């Protein structure tokens, strides 16, 4: 039950500023992260973000899956937790930063867009745009990921994903596209969870 509430708390903590206009999204990212982490520490004093390259992320997932496979041969499962929550928490663009926790559509965006999501637990993540899966090698999209350690034990409990793209070319003026993140647990009960939002271009 505690783990189910963790994602909810994170969503509340990440909802800083509503639609706050920003001239330079990239330069404001670290300040936003710092604010979120400070507020998170009020609930989880030892919480930390752990920077990961995509290669490190994929290696970590593979390692946990291999642990699970080895353990399952003797009738038990490794400690990698299943996915308990997937949420799109924030969308940033040239028009500012918008918290989108319970929304189905964004306010109008323009320019470079960054979609921020949280996956609680370990699962395979598939990103969709306009109904089609996005390959991590697609040059039109940039992916990044951070681990979230809730209790300071250096074991990653959740993942913070970001997907970035140019909305002027990938959506176009007066149009919209749906973004969806789907995660399937690598561990029992092998469930699938997802969240989606329609990105509206001005």
Image (cartoon, rainbow, N blue to C red):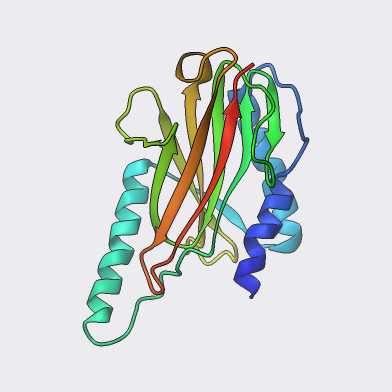
* Foreground of the two, 9 or 34: 9
Name above or below for residue 194 compared with residue 53. Answer: below
At which x and y percent is residue 70? 23, 76
Q: State the residue at coordinates (33%, 65%).
A: 64
Name above or below for residue 118 compared with residue 23. Answer: below
Count of all numbered marks drawn on residues in the image: 0
* Foreground of the two, 145 or 96: 96
State which quadrant residue 174 falls in.
top right
At which x and y percent is residue 71? 27, 80
Q: State the residue at coordinates (36%, 35%).
A: 134
At which x and y percent is residue 52? 42, 45
State which quadrant residue 152 falls in.
bottom right
Name above or below for residue 173 compared with residue 130. Answer: above
* Foreground of the two, 172 or 62: 172
Q: Which image quarter holds the C terminus? A: top right
Query: In the displayed image of the protein, which residue is found farthest to the bottom?
Result: 75
Q: Which image quarter holds the N terminus? A: bottom right
């Amino acid at each position: 039950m505690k783990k189910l509430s963790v994602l909810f708390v994170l969503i509340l903590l990440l909802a800083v500023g509503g639609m706050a206009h920003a001239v330079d999204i990239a330069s404001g990212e670290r300040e936003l992260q710092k604010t979120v982490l400070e507020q998170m520490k009020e609930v989880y004093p030892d919480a930390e973000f752990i920077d990961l390259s995509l290669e490190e992320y994929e290696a970590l997932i593979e390692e946990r899956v291999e642990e699970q496979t080895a353990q399952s041969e003797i009738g038990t499962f490794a400690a990698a937790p299943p996915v308990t929550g997937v949420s799109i928490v924030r969308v940033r663009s040239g028009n500012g930063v918008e918290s989108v926790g319970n929304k189905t559509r964004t306010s109008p965006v323009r320019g470079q867009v960054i979609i921020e999501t949280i996956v609680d637990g370990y699962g395979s993540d598939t990103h969709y745009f306009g109904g089609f899966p996005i390959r991590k090698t697609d040059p039109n999209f940039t992916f990044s990921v951070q681990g979230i350690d809730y209790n300071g034990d250096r074991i990653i409990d959740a993942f913070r994903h970001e997907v970035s793209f140019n909305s002027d070319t990938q959506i176009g003026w007066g149009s919209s596209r749906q973004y969806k993140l789907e995660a399937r647990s690598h561990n029992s009960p092998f469930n699938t969870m997802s969240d989606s939002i329609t990105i509206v271009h001005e």
